[in-house]
Image: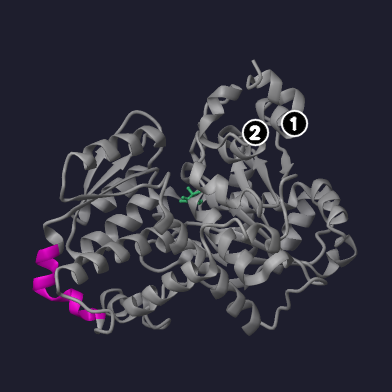
Amino acid sequence: MEFSKEFWCGKVQAISDAADKQETLWLNDKMVSCESYRENMTLTAEDIADASRRLERFAPYICEQFPETMDSGGFIESPLKEIPNMKKALEKEFDFRISGRLFLKMDSHLPIAGSVKARGGIYEILKYAERLAISNGYLKETDDYRILMTKECMDLFHKYTIQVGSTGNLGLSIGIISAKLGFKVIVHMSSDAKQWKKDMLRNKGVTVIEYEGDFCLAVSQGRAKSEKDPLSYFVDDENSTDLFLGYSVAGERLKKQLDSLGVCVDADHPLFVYLPCGIGGGPGGITFGLKEAFGDNVHCFFAEPVHACSMLLGLATGRHDEVCVQDFGLEGKTRADGLAVSRPSRLVGKIIGPMISGVMTVQDERLDIFVKMLMESERYYIEPSACASFAGVLHRDALKSYMLNKKILSYAHQAVHIAWATGGSLVPDIERIY
Ligand SMILES: *Cc1c(COP(=O)(O)O)cnc(C)c1O
């Protein structure tokens, strides 16, 4: 009975809180310095650089096909904004001071797909398209990638089908880029997916298959269907290194943005980043990239709904995808549709195990309050899932003890906090609640 719910609840306070459906913060006792985990890592800075160069090769193509990326030269990147009015609103709501500065990383407004999935999802499809075009003799790495817009290339891509399982946003991102390149696309949607996301995809010629069950079912059905077709490629959100690396490029890009705003990050000016987490690939890849960019001066926390805290359970037990939220009496249902995942990714859990600072949970009701607060204070709309990133301020006391432990509490007033807003700009007006 070593791995029963009772065993873990007795052993780890945060697991006991999670099973009681209480908000909590789990601090990672297996976290080590960057220097010590790098020795054992299968992925390296060179893998990020490789992804970064690939996105550079594609920039002329992206720029031409998606004019909204013109200003950024074909790079899919989002603004970083300081949100002092939101900070004041949070301080008023919770009746305490937040030390340091508060920023919003607006992946909610990433071009093309309006969510963090525009990083990993689009990257994986571009990489696949590049490989196909090169192996068929249509493309060299030194070419102008706008060549991929020719009928020849699009006809080649049209022979292949891309499939993916999704709670919504990954499907949107993969569907949009794949359809643009010429691929046939099938998106397997879980019951949590919003109707407007399915409608938008169908309007782009994407086949959407709906399932009664949750995200894991949509993924396994999609994987099975794809395996039967030799001309089908499956984007595997549970196990994809390419997705992970697509997200990781965010680290060096954020560093450039902070530099250009004159915001210093060093041992005396610690950076705290709060990332909404579903299966783990998005926040995990970004964490890996941030650690490569800022080393031990960045402290990354994942944020999950109380009812779908699968990554917390996977990491705190060290058993990753061998545990699911149902094992702990939770249903996995949440209004944060992008985070409605009951079993975490083993691949991601193992990679980020030594680098993640902790995982926090937040009640669904708070997410709606945060949506409204951000809208009223800063006039930005981000979706409820993305608002999990404001959970960082809730767990003030636990964060204080973390800082004390890391010997940085005396620099708290110089800290930079970033709430990573993971989605929202494509949400239609009538779906917006505030
Ligand atoms: C997918 C998603 C996340 C989390 O990404 P994972 O890779 O599933 O962990 C967070 N926020 C939003 C809005 C998302 O769509």
Q: Is residue 148 above or below residue 333?
A: below
In magenta stretch: residue 155: yes
Q: Is residue 285 above or below residue 264?
A: above
Tag 1–tag 2 contact (CB < 8 Å):
yes
Q: Quadrant of the N terminus?
A: top right
Check disc 1 and report the residue beneath it. 12
Check disc 2 and report the residue beneath it. 317
As rendered, which of 282 and 96 lies closer to the eye?
282
Task: Give the magenta-colored segment's residue range.
Answer: 145-156
Horizontal side of 159 relative to 265 (left or right) equals: left
Under circle 2, the secondary element is helix
Residue at x 20% of width, y 76% of height: 139
Give coordinates of residue 88: x percent, y percent: 76, 62
Say whether mark 2 is within 8 Å of ligand 1: no
As rendered, which of 189 and 97 lies closer to the eye?
189
Say whether mark 1 is within 8 Å of ligand 1: no
Give coordinates of residue 20: x percent, y percent: 69, 25
Q: Looking at this rendering, what residue extends furthest in the front direction?
A: 39
Give coordinates of residue 122: x percent, y percent: 35, 62
Q: Residues within 10 Å of mark 2 (few under 14, many from 20)?
A: some
Instruction: Mark yes or no: residue 114 visible.
Output: no
Could you tell me the amino acid type at mark 1? Val
Could you tell me the amino acid type at mark 2? Thr
Residue at x 49% of width, y 61% of height: 108
Toward which corner of the image does residue 254 lie, by quadrant? bottom right
Horizontal side of 382 relative to 51 (left or right) equals: right
Disc assigned to residue 113: none
In magenta stretch: residue 185: no
Residue at x 22% of width, y 38% of height: 225
Give coordinates of residue 145: x percent, y percent: 25, 79
